Image (cartoon, grey):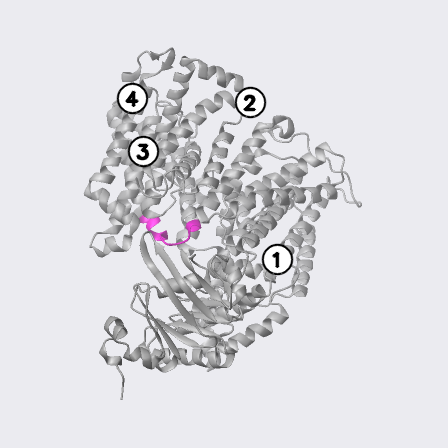
Amino acid sequence: MRHSLRRDITIGAIAITALVLLPLVWPSKALIDFVIRGASLGLFATSLNLLIGYGGMVSFGHGLFFGLGAYSFGLLMQRTGMPIPAAFVLTIVVNAAVALAIGAICVRLKEIYFAFLTLAFQMFLYSLIILWVPLTGGDQGLRGGIPRPTFLGIDLADQKQLYIASCVLLVIGLMLMRHIVASPFGYTLRMIRDNAIRAAFLGINVFRIKLVAFVLAGIFGGIGGVIMSLFVSGAYPEFAYWTVSGEGVFIIMLGGLSTFLGPMVGAVILLLLNDVVTRFTEYYGLTLGAIILLFALGLRRGLTDFLLDYWRQFRAARAPMQRS
Amino acid sequence: MDLASLVSCFGSPACVITQVTSGLIIGMLLFLVAAGLTLIFGVLKVINFTHGAFYMLGAYFALTIFKLTGSYVITLFGAAFGTALVGLVFERLFISRVYGRNMLMQLLVCYGFILIFDDVVKIVWGAEFRSMGMPTIFQVPPIFIAGGVVPPFYLFLVGVTIVIGVVLWLVIERTRFGKVVRALAYNPTMVSVLGINTGILYGLVFALGGLLAGFAGALAAPVRSLTPGMGFSILIESFIVTVIGGMGSIVGAFVGSLLIGLIRTFGSVGFPLFTDGLMYLFMVVVLISKPTGLFGKEIA
Amino acid sequence: MLSIERLSKSFEGIAAISDVTLDFPTGSLTAVIGPNGAGKTTLFNLISGALRADAGCVMLDGTDLVGLSRTEIVRCGIARAFQVASIFPSLTVEETLNAAVQAHRGRAAVLGQRFPLADCGERAREVMDMLSLSKEADTLSAKLSHGDQKLLDIALALVLQPRVLLLDEPTAGMGTEERWQMIEKVYRLWEREKMTVVFIEHDMDIVFKIANSIRVLCYGRVLAEGTPDQIRCNADVIAAYLGTEHEVEP
């Protein structure tokens, strides 16, 4: 399938419109909360998939950037008087810088060692957050809420406007990542994933490409964290705990890692499961565990991967008939 | 940061003894869990994320068996073999289906089971903290070494673990079973071509890992409070140990566990809020300088 | 002109390549033959920079390649294809070549545009045609036939516009007819592009028919070198490798 810029922009515009109109059709606070959380998680998981699905770099520590984004933004808003857009940009810069530093160390390592080192860095950051009580509030997190001065007439203290902002961030974020994946860089990344040795023989600087991917993933993961910090009006150590990374991996596996929107689908599935399962049974672990096994042993791949394979088989089965 | 306390602790024999014994306890329990983890990885090339749950099951099995029999010896062996059985079934029925699939799929299966096991434990034993209590044999006054307090059970725990460690080493290095298992780690195809049923062997290796984790759980039960979440933290720590010691190396697991145990205890004196941070820092350093860990890749 | 001078490489005390001196005249089509374990692939690894020689030098038109990085060696004009096709399973043939061309032109990290880049597309199609792969342009590399995978592997080397092309057993794993088809493509390629081609081959019929010079390796040393006729008569080569069936035919 050819990726065309215009087509993607059109889809993006339609998506934003649909999301913005949704609460009018279905007014519900739960829906608004769901979508905002979905935006945060969806951006995070899609950014992780840049590494796992497209780059073949399995990171167990991506939650670092989620937490870092949340805390950086929260701290900037609480401590300085800067307007939200400025804090947002600065948070991106911080995430990029940390990703550059950590990535330069981690990206050289292979597979499982890369996974463990990223995890170690994340948990180290978590420990720092717990330790540095005067700055971060320690295990209590950033309290006192996040000030939201209006900017350009937008007031993010209003839940509806936060909703719209989250949707816009989600769609733009996804579109940017989509563009990255469809660019020459994206294909070079796939080459490295498939066969790094041959890629090197073609003159590709594998280290540099992987590092850039790591930084880009860190940026978008951080944006997910910013949305979450606005949503809960604070930042908590849990945002940097290894379970966030685990959830990210889990979401990608659920939704499918070979399609671009797989992680987004996975995020929605997980949020739905969280809400629905807790409503019907107190045995959340048992149910969720069983569903996970269904995916892992039954479908053996994420939902969108499964649907894609099914679609391909379907077309292949029909094609001979059409030719004759 | 409380370096003053740390320095003064090093100066006081009582403090050193207390911290060292606490560190040994943590280290020994960690060793049993990490040894199983590293064995499973070395032979089966699977990262068993469910291993923490095995430890938890061992502890809860111990709780029930002790309540039923009152004998700690039966408890130890019962819990260990019970967990070994769980490991065997888990491998034969579930893990065997995801061999060769990418690591993330295996992780997913394990994660599913962590959730299931946690809930099963919650259902059967309840979600509140449970406690097994110290078996009467060990309800004796603590021993004083150089002024430091050493509960006798601690000595028992260390002793038993060392015995288990030695037996494990002998089994791996000196028995035919151990030889086949080591061969399996290097060349599974060859082993199966020689007519050996590799499937059952894989199951037995998992069972062995479960046995070790079960022993750990049963040994921990008298001195730790039991809760459905207890698998998580020991899992993370045993991963750190396997990374530091070297995946697939049992000697590495031993050294790594001792190091972590001591870092924990002395670290909590000097860096009370940052003990975990020290561990992770150590992990970062090892991974950067020698990713294969202190003792490399072979099963020792 | 590619010349190897006193090249040596050992692995843990065992000499894989020992004091090898050879040359490959510019524009020649040379076959490197020898029994298994003779060091043929190691020789390729040393020339292409995958391994670093213990001693000796690899001179390409006056530049010593030993010690240079793989990328630098590629830039000097050496490209290789592999015994087991080393390709990118999840990309189609056209995507693979597009990506390879873009990498060769230093555009691998471009983020601002969409893939494929227009100018790279032209060159990619050119290379596909050279190896008759155009009909498989949209096929996933993983789904290609074995022979086409080997062709793609060679295409990836051609993208680099090499002066010297190293082919490691281009006909490996093929039946007789397929082997001749493959070697014919190699021959036509060599004729048209006028580059120096060195190939490792085990099928002696093919070697004697196609190659215009032959180098024989045995136990890491040069056993003989020369034209096919010379090699056919060479007693050492016959004794060590060929047996009597390839002796001079009337």
Query: Which residues are drawn in magenta?
Result: B93-105
The Cα atoms of the two marked residues, 1 and 4, are separated by 59 Å
A55 lies above or below C174: above
In the image, which disc is placed on residue B156? Answer: 4
Which of discs 2 and 4 lies nearer the camera? The answer is 2
Q: Who comes first in sequence, dot 2 or dot 4? A: 2
C132 lies above or below B259: below
- On whether residue A280 falls in the magenta region, the answer is no
Neighbour tally class for label 2: few under 14, some 14-19, many 20 plus, Cα within 10 Å: some
| Residue name at image x 62 percent, y 28 percent | A137
> Is circle 2 on the same chain as circle 3?
yes
Q: Secondary structure at mark 2?
A: loop
Neighbour tally class for label 1: few under 14, some 14-19, many 20 plus, Cα within 10 Å: many
Residue labelled with disc 2: B1
Q: Are marks 2 and 3 in contact (CB under 8 Å)?
A: no
> Is circle 1 on the same chain as circle 2?
no
Q: Is residue A286 left or right of residue A222?
A: left
Magenta stretch, overall SS: helix
In the image, which disc is placed on residue A180? Answer: 1
Q: Nearer the viewer, residue B16 or B264?
A: B16
For the residue marked with disc 1, what is the amino acid? Ile
B208 lies above or below B69: below
Q: Secondary structure at mark 3?
A: helix
Q: Can see residue C219? A: yes
